[in-house]
Image (tube, rainbow, N blue to C red):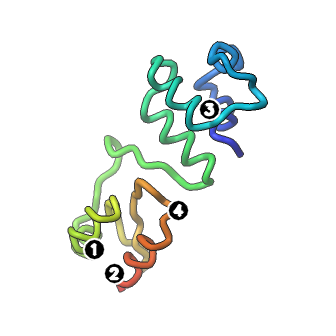
Amino acid sequence: MFLVDALLDSKHISLGDLESSGKPIDHVDDEIIARQLLASGKISPLQLVAARAKKMQIPSVDFSEFTIEASALRAVPADLCKRHQVIPLKIEEDELYVAMVHPGDVIALDDLRSASG
């Protein structure tokens, strides 16, 4: 799935929005179009995050509606969180859940596994 498809599926944008971007729809660069839509106010930052998550088939987190567990914060050293732009969210059945700026970062995932046991 492309980012633009996720935005269209969620009804955050229309085909008209894409056509007004000035690029042929079949040659759309997802990230360029997403940045243009964000800059023009056609989508919000939260809508872009949700679309990226949908594209990657992972959940997104709205921090205004989520309570971070103290036990999760204690499970990962703060310097590791800063280095990899990670926020520990919760621990459920011995599994650590995190929010990541770059969820495909395998080095960060390996470091998290090592640090949290």
Question: Badge 3 is on which residue?
Answer: 7
Question: Badge 1 is on which residue?
Answer: 76
Is label 4 in a helix, a strand or a loop?
Answer: loop
Disc 3 residue type?
Leu
Is label 3 in a helix, a strand or a loop?
Answer: helix
Q: Are marks 1 and 2 in contact (CB under 8 Å)?
A: yes
Quarter of image, res 14: top right
Give the left or right position of residue 109, taking residue 69 as reference.
right
Foreground mark, 4 or 1, reads: 4
N-term mark: 3 or 4: 3
N-term mark: 1 or 3: 3
- Callout 3 crowding tier (Cα within 10 Å): few <14, some 14–19, many ≥20: many
- Residue depicted at 62% across the width and 54% down the height: 57
- Callout 2 crowding tier (Cα within 10 Å): few <14, some 14–19, many ≥20: few
Is label 2 in a helix, a strand or a loop?
Answer: helix
Question: Badge 2 is on which residue?
Answer: 116
**Observer-nearest residue: 84 or 67?**
84
Seen in the picture, residue 112 relative to 99 is either above or below; the reply is below
N-term mark: 2 or 4: 4
